Image (tube, helix red, strand yellow):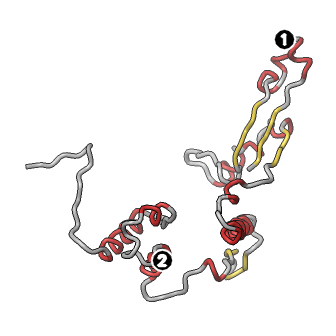
Amino acid sequence: MRLLTVPCERHLQDDPSMVSDKVFRGKVVLFGGDFRQILLVITNGGRQDVVNSTINASYLWEKCTVLRLTVNMRLESGSTQSEKKEIQDFAANILDIRNEQLVVERMDNLLPVFPDEMLIQETEDDVGAIIDDTYPDLLRNLWNPSFFQEKAILAPTHEMIDIINQLMLTMLIGDEKEYESSDSFLLG
């Protein structure tokens, strides 16, 4: 995460007439976030339009001071040293991939290289393999709330989510019951 500050010069506080010439009227402004992840949406704009609209491309950028946070507090969440190490290694791998340090060139494309322990081996039922890897011993842990709170399967489309949900429902024992949302009504 980067923090940007636009400095407030002390003499501006003493002489209000000078405030209008300064960025943000001389106030300190703090921008936070990872600017690689926070992009503007430009209607009918292409990649170049989006890149040119970022704060890095703004005339304000030269007036900013970049401060970097050096400790990722989320990496401290593990309860044991081995869990903390596993979380740190995972975060380092993701950052390396994002910074294009772990890439290989294949057919004129740069593709990320993932460590073997992050991969699910190819199988006839890829979705089932993802479910089994994410929720091992599903039926045994069905009534354990923390089992589901600590895991998630992310999917790129609603169609893929529907496929995953339907497959998981077939793995569960019992009758399926559908509850209507409070904003819907039954006809008839």
Q: Residue at x 85, y 35 (%)?
A: 63
Q: Are marks 2 and 1 in contact (CB under 8 Å)?
A: no
Residue 46 lies left or right of residue 89; in this view the side is: left
- Seen as rendered, the residue at the extreme left is 188
Which numbered disc covers residue 16? 1
Q: Residue at x 75, y 35 (%)?
A: 30
Q: Nearer the viewer, residue 158 or 10?
A: 10
Q: Nearer the viewer, residue 114 or 21?
A: 114
Residue 152 lies left or right of residue 51; in this view the side is: left
Name the secondary structure under disc 1. Answer: helix
Q: Is residue 72 above or below residue 9?
A: below
Query: Mark 2 or mark 1: which comes first in sequence?
Result: 1
Name the secondary structure under disc 2. Answer: helix
- Specify the amino acid type for callout 1: Pro
User: Residue 124, image x and y in percent?
Assistant: 44, 88
Q: Is residue 97 visible?
A: no
Q: Nearer the viewer, residue 174 or 95?
A: 174
> What is the quadrant of residue 80 in the picture?
bottom right
Q: Nearer the viewer, residue 176 or 93?
A: 176
Q: Residue at x 41, y 72 (%)?
A: 141
- Where is mark 2, residue-wise? 130
Residue 184 lies left or right of residue 161; in this view the side is: left
Q: Residue at x 69, y 72 (%)?
A: 82
Disc 2 or disc 1, which is closer to the eye? 2
Q: CA distance from mark 2 to mark 1?
A: 62 Å
Q: Dot 2, how many residues are within 10 Å of its Cα: few (below 14), some (14-19), or many (20+)?
A: some
User: Residue 53, image x and y in percent?
Assistant: 69, 44
User: Residue 99, image x and y in percent?
Assistant: 75, 64
